[in-house]
Image (cartoon, rainbow, N blue to C red):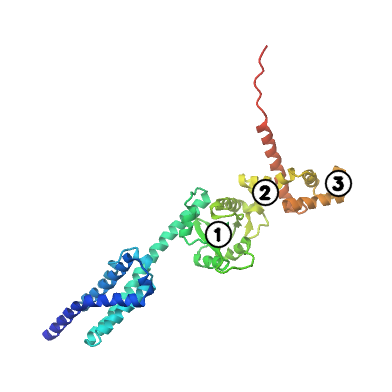
């Protein structure tokens, strides 16, 4: 027993005497065989070399007391600065361990089998320790990303964001280069965020996910394709249909397309307004466009819906030189009857047909449909109210008449 202890003490002393040479050999081997190491700045190379040297010294401690395997292996990475995890990947760390093991095996080729076996066992512990360190770092980054994502989505919904919004979404991996739309629905019992993200990537779109109670909010943005393509991008409504299984049952509303993520709050306001009143439309599809709910939103007091109806329907017709606005008023007031409208305007029914066609070309809605008629009727009423208010606002204030 005493001979065995003395032999191990001599082996440990020999290992300690060659640690300096081993560290030098490891650094030389890394420079020759690991391109990423030679391309590093001097400060990071020094940090990586410190980790390698710490691993060699820790092996001697581990060999002397193998019961300390767990804490000795973890202490190897304690010598590295925290920012090294962001510059050295797990794959590169395993390459580093492989180089250290190779140098050890070459130097101890004629040593006792106990040392060679110890090198293999210790390299296994180091590999598991490295995986644990990177897994914890990834978990912490994931929690931080989740908090940042929730903050970004909340700022988009409230419209209270600043100039830092683009940098924040970029930190979340947002590659969007243009159009954005917001999709609002109910939160499912089991939320599969990874599946939602895979569906978005399949359609070359970025995705921000926010959960607010029973509401699930997705901010969808077009991402740059990996390779140039002449194909038209997938419409947001089609993307919403593919994302639909990830929502709970019930309402699902897609906000209008906006030019960039900075303007996503406008799409979010429309989607939220539509989400709150979509039950008032008996034939609402799933998903449904928020702009298909403009009359209901306007009746519920949504100022954005009122402004949209006036600007997209009433104002283009009012500014048109022909009698399109008057024709539309008469057509809707007469129950969409061509003959009754023609009699009131003293024109031929074909003239009414022609004007209705021109109206559809100007505003994009067909007045002959029941649903479209409701939208246009609401727009005309709101436009007339806006004009009446504007007239009153522009009326000059008269000074009181002086008594003679």
Q: Secondary structure at mark 1?
A: strand
- Identify the mark at residue 295; answer none if there is no mark: 2
Q: In the picture provided, is 39 more to the left or to the right than 210?
A: left
Closest to the camera, between mark 2 and mark 3, is 3
Q: Position of residue 149 (x, y in %)?
A: 47, 57
Q: Residues within 10 Å of mark 1 (few under 14, many from 20)?
A: some
Query: Which residue position holds label 1?
Result: 177
Observer able to see residue 124? no
Observer able to see residue 279? yes
Q: Residues within 10 Å of mark 3 (few under 14, many from 20)?
A: some
Q: Secondary structure at mark 3?
A: helix
Q: In the picture provided, is 359 more to the left or to the right than 204?
A: right
| Gap between marks 1 and 2 measured at Cα | 32 Å
Which residue lies at the image location 53% right of the left edge and 52% below the top edge? 262
The answer to which of 153 and 84 lies nearer the viewer is: 84
N-terminal-most mark, 3 or 1 = 1
Q: Secondary structure at mark 2?
A: helix
Q: Position of residue 172 (x, y in %)?
A: 47, 60
Which residue lies at the image location 28% right of the left edge and 81% below the top edge? 103
| Gap between marks 2 and 3 measured at Cα | 27 Å
Q: Position of residue 93 (x, y in %)?
A: 35, 73
Q: Position of residue 150 (x, y in %)?
A: 47, 56
Query: Which residue position holds label 3?
Result: 342
Is 51 rendered above or below residue 269?
Answer: below
N-terminal-most mark, 1 or 2 = 1
**Marks 1 and 2: CB-CB under 8 Å?**
no
């Amino acid at each position: 027993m005493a001979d065995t202890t003395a032999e191990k003490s001599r082996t440990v002393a020999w290992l300690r005497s060659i640690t300096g040479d081993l560290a030098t050999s490891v650094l030389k081997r890394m420079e020759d065989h690991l391109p990423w190491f030679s391309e590093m700045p001097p400060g990071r190379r020094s940090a990586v070399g410190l980790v390698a040297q710490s691993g060699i010294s820790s092996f001697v401690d581990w060999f002397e007391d193998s019961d300390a395997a767990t804490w000795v292996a973890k202490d190897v990475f304690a010598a590295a600065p925290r920012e090294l995890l962001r510059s050295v990947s797990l794959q590169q760390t395993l390459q580093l361990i492989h180089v250290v093991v190779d140098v050890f095996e070459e130097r101890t080729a004629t040593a006792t089998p106990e040392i060679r076996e110890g090198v293999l066992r210790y390299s296994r512990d180091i590999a598991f320790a490295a995986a644990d360190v990177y897994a914890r770092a990834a978990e912490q980054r994931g929690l931080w990303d989740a908090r940042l994502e929730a903050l970004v989505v909340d700022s988009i919904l409230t419209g209270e964001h600043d100039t830092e919004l683009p940098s924040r979404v970029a930190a979340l991996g947002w590659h969007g280069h243009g159009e954005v739309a917001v999709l609002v629905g109910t939160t499912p019992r089991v939320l599969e965020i990874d599946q939602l993200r895979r569906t978005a990537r399949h359609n070359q779109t970025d995705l921000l996910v926010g959960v607010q109670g029973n509401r699930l909010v997705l901010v969808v943005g077009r991402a740059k394709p990996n390779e140039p393509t002449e194909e038209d991008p997938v419409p947001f409504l089609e993307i919403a249909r593919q994302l639909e299984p990830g929502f709970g049952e019930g309402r699902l509303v897609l906000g209008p397309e906006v030019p960039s993520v900075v303007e996503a709050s406008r799409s979010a306001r429309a989607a939220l307004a539509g989400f709150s009143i979509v039950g008032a439309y008996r034939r609402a599809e799933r998903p449904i466009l928020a702009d298909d709910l403009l009359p209901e939103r306007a009746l519920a007091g949504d100022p954005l819906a009122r402004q949209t109806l006036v600007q997209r329907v009433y104002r283009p017709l009012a500014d048109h030189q022909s009698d399109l606005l008057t024709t539309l008023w008469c057509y809707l007031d007469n129950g969409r009857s061509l003959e009754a409208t023609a009699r009131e305007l003293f024109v031929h029914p074909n003239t009414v047909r022609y004007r209705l066609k021109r109206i559809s070309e100007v505003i994009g809605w067909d007045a002959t449909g029941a649903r479209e008629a409701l939208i246009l009727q609401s727009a005309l009423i709101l436009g007339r109210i806006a004009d009446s208010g504007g007239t009153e606002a522009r009326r000059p204030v008269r000074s009181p008449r002086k008594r003679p």
